């Protein structure tokens, strides 16, 4: 898998920002702080499932995050996703249970 990421054009980035803000509200996905109330808070596009595991710009995998939360999450899987994987796959034999 390549570590190179496709660069987004400013128009496509703006489209993602607007579409995701409409879908999720104008809040950081992780800390729920409102971007409208604090216009200086820098919002970023974050891959919910890290780009190295899902290497695309699919809108279903993108969320808006404040810069601090995006940096804190880094390249980790979010805990709700980890718990979902544990619930679906049994750790004792790793076979699909659903």
Image: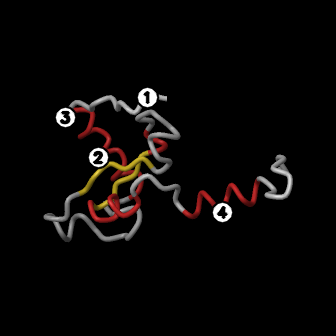
Pick whichever of labels 2 and 1 is earlier in the sequence: 1
Q: What SS does tag 1 mark?
A: loop
Residue in the picture at 19% in, 64% down? 41
Q: What SS does tag 3 mark?
A: helix
Q: Which mark is residue 11?
A: none
Pick whichever of labels 4 and 2 is earlier in the sequence: 2
Disc 1: CA contacts within 10 A as few (<14), some (14-19) or many (>=20): few
Between 72 and 36, the one lying in front of the other is 72
Q: Which mark is residue 17?
A: 2
Q: Identify residue for label 1.
A: 2
Pick whichever of labels 1 and 4 is earlier in the sequence: 1
Q: Which mark is residue 10?
A: 3
Q: What SS does tag 2 mark?
A: helix
Residue 59 in the image, given as x and y percentages of width and height: 43, 40
The residues bearing labels 4 and 3 have C-alpha atoms spaced at a distance of 35 Å
Say which quarter of the image contains residue 15: top left
Q: Are marks 1 and 3 in contact (CB under 8 Å)?
A: no
Disc 3: CA contacts within 10 A as few (<14), some (14-19) or many (>=20): few
Between 1 and 88, the one lying in front of the other is 1
Q: What SS does tag 4 mark?
A: helix
Q: Identify residue for label 4.
A: 83
Residue 39 in the image, given as x and y percentages of width and height: 15, 64
**Image position of 9 with respect to 70: above or below:** above
**Image position of 95 with respect to 71: above or below:** above
Q: Relative to 95, is 85 on the left or the right?
A: left
The residues bearing labels 2 and 3 have C-alpha atoms spaced at a distance of 10 Å
The residues bearing labels 1 and 3 have C-alpha atoms spaced at a distance of 23 Å
Pick whichever of labels 1 and 3 is earlier in the sequence: 1
For the residues carrying marks 4 and 3, which lies nearer the camera in this image? 4
Q: Are marks 4 and 2 in contact (CB under 8 Å)?
A: no
């Amino acid at each position: 898998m390549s570590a190179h990421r496709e660069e987004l054009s400013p128009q496509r980035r703006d489209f993602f920002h607007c579409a995701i803000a409409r879908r999720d509200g104008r809040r950081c996905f992780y800390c729920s702080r409102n971007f409208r109330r604090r216009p200086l808070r820098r919002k970023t596009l974050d891959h919910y499932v890290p780009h190295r595991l899902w290497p695309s710009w699919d809108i279903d995998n993108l969320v808006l995050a404040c810069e601090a939360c995006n940096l804190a999450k880094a390249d980790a899987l979010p805990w709700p996703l980890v718990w979902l994987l544990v619930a679906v796959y049994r750790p004792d034999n790793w076979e699909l249970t659903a």
